[in-house]
Image (tube, helix red, strand yellow):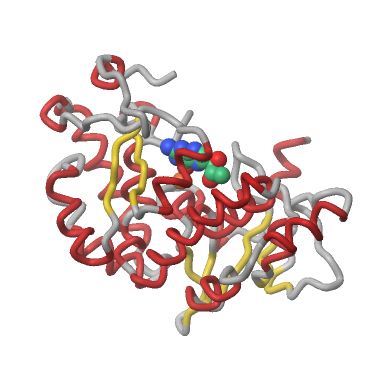
Amino acid sequence: MIDDPIIASQTPAEDFTIRQVWDAYTEEEHGVWDTLYERQSELLKGRTTHEFLDGLKKLSLSEGGIPNLDDLNPKLEALTGWKVVMVPHLVPDDVFFDHLANRRFPAGRFIRKADQLDYLQEPDIFHDIFGHVPLLTQPIFADYMEAYGKGGLRALEYNGLKNLARLYWYTVEFGLIKTPEGLRHYGAGIVSSFGEAQYSLESPSPHRIDFDLMRVMQTDYKIDDYQDVYFVIDSFEQLFEATQQDFAPLYDQLSKVSEAYTPQTILKTDSVLQKGTLEYSQSKSA
Ligand code: HBI
Ligand code: FE
């Protein structure tokens, strides 16, 4: 559990939200944000999709320390009607989806420690705001995230959560996108990570495969290390359109195929952009 006195002092509301109490952040905590922001925004140039960088600029997330939601939310709401709410920790799936379905992005309040810049037990405010919020300024992605929340509530009814969570993982968290300038990333787990922002594009190790909805929904993932496979979209329009359908028959179909694919698997039917050497994960398991 995260040790944060402001979180500990509050009883969360029914929707699990808490107050940010921005004045209570310490100088050291603001310093961690500034260090991470500077390191990461430098690294993202030429690696991250321009829609993300555009969002980062529009929200001026760089202006001194941890963002204050009272300043951030009016800017974000004016652009797409989204806002950020604070939560104490990971919230139950139905609560998470209900927030997204109503254009509220739940973000953790706490920030990682200065001596653990690259280690995360749980998503912190840097991952949640720097990683996720810039793309919420972009109408097409804002719509995708709302649709995902609505889809999540339905997935709970149709026993499809595992499949849908994989879609989130391989797009919202770890997605790559083709651009005229080459491959770029847009997933929040990548753009907020110093190591993976490089590895995901530059390492020969992971597979990079064209996005296919049903393929992605059948693929397991690693939660505690760099990915062995990334799925690549052509555009946010492609992603949005692929998910504008009734998922109930898809879940039904998926429940009849036996096992999920491992991240290392390449199928005959895959459109492979780069077959990875898998040297990174093999060196770890050796
Ligand atoms: N809660 N705060 C928070 N942040 C998340 O990213 C999150 C969550 N609860 C559930 C959840 N994610 C996932 O289970 C869904 O994406 C499936
Ligand atoms: Fe995340």
- Total numbered circles: 0
User: Measured along the vertical axis of the image, is residue 72 above or below residue 214?
Assistant: above
Q: Residue at x 15, y 55 (%)?
A: 74
Q: Residue at x 41, y 29 (%)?
A: 89
Q: Where the C terminus falls, by quadrant? A: top right
- Residue 77, given in percent of the width and then of the height, sits at 22, 59
Q: As rendered, which of 279 and 167 lies closer to the eye? A: 167
Q: Is residue 235 left or right of residue 49?
A: right
- Residue 225, given in percent of the width and then of the height, sits at 60, 40
Q: Where the N terminus falls, by quadrant? A: top left
The quadrant holding residue 251 is bottom right
Q: Is residue 126 left or right of residue 240?
A: left
Q: Is residue 94 left or right of residue 158?
A: left
- Residue 10, given in percent of the width and then of the height, sits at 26, 19
Q: Is residue 160 left or right of residue 40?
A: right
Q: Residue at x 44, y 59 (%)?
A: 145
Q: Residue at x 68, y 74 (%)?
A: 273
Q: Residue furthest front?
A: 157
- Residue 143, given in percent of the width and then of the height, sits at 41, 66
User: Measured along the vertical axis of the image, is residue 102 above or below residue 90?
Assistant: below
